[in-house]
Amino acid sequence: MDLLKKLVMALLILVLLFVGVGFILPSEFKVERSISIDAPADKVYAQVVDLKNWRNWGVWFQRDPAMQVSYEGPEAEVGMVSKWVSESEGNGEMKIIAADANKRLVYSLYFPDFEMGSTGEIVLKEADGKTEVIWQDYGDVGSNPINHYFAAMMDSMVGPDFETGLENLKVLVENRH
């Protein structure tokens, strides 16, 4: 019985420590990746601003070709919405909330299954016929200490997808340029 009490006490301490550390971890996160594309910004922007084109380079669409996607609102401008349902990639919604042609696209992202959202930006910087593409996503997971662990791991979870997506975008744009 003494051993059982010690095991329960050790488990309780571990849980309290896990939750306590969760409170200390930041609730905010930011993921950022970039790539240089050998093409003018308008060619890159055309692939980014029209959410229908994301199927051609977004890694999530490659992982689930059966993903059900629908679109609403104006096409390739502020207000365009993409909604998807996927068993492997989750369900979500993306909406363009700001755009500066050939320079910047800002979108809101929402995952209803997790009741979590974020803001994403794709910034284009053209110089000498090449375009640096900076893709970032940032947000706040709230006060739940368990979600703080997700915030701490967001870069390692999402960063590789951004890298692959940017590589796909580079190949797509440079082959059409």
Image (cartoon, rainbow, N blue to C red):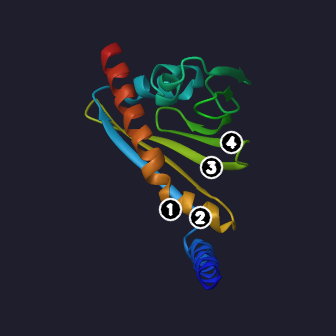
Query: Which residue is at 52% across, 32% downward?
Result: 101
| Amino acid found under the numbered disc labelled 1 | Ala
Question: Label 4, label 1: how many angstroms apart (C-alpha)?
Answer: 18 Å
Disc 2 residue type?
A: His
Q: Earlier in the sequence, mark 2 or mark 3?
A: 3
Disc 1 to disc 2, how far (Cα)?
Answer: 6 Å
Read off the residue under disc 1: 152
Q: Residues within 10 Å of mark 1 (few under 14, many from 20)?
A: some
Q: Secondary structure at mark 1?
A: helix
Residue behind mark 2: 148
Do residues under tags 1 and 2 come within 8 Å of each other at their CB atoms?
A: yes
First in sequence: mark 1 vs mark 3? 3
Q: Residues within 10 Å of mark 2 (few under 14, many from 20)?
A: many
Q: Residue at x 65, y 82 (%)?
A: 1
The residue positioned 54% from the left and 23% from the top of the image is 64
Is residue 17 at least partly visible in the picture? yes
For the C terminus, give its image quadrant: top left
Q: Position of residue 14 (x, y in %)?
A: 57, 75
What residue is disc 3 on?
118
| Amino acid found under the numbered disc labelled 3 | Ser
- 150 w.r.t. 64: above or below: below
Q: Amino acid at mark 4?
A: Phe
SS under mark 2: helix
Between disc 1 and disc 3, the foreground one is: 1
Secondary structure at badge 4 equals: strand
From the image, state whether disc 2 or disc 3 is nearer to you.
2
Of the pair 126 and 170, the residue shown nearer to us: 170
Q: Which residue is mark 4?
A: 111
User: In this rendering, which labeled residue sits more in front, label 3 or label 4?
Assistant: 4
Q: Position of residue 132 (x, y in %)?
A: 34, 39
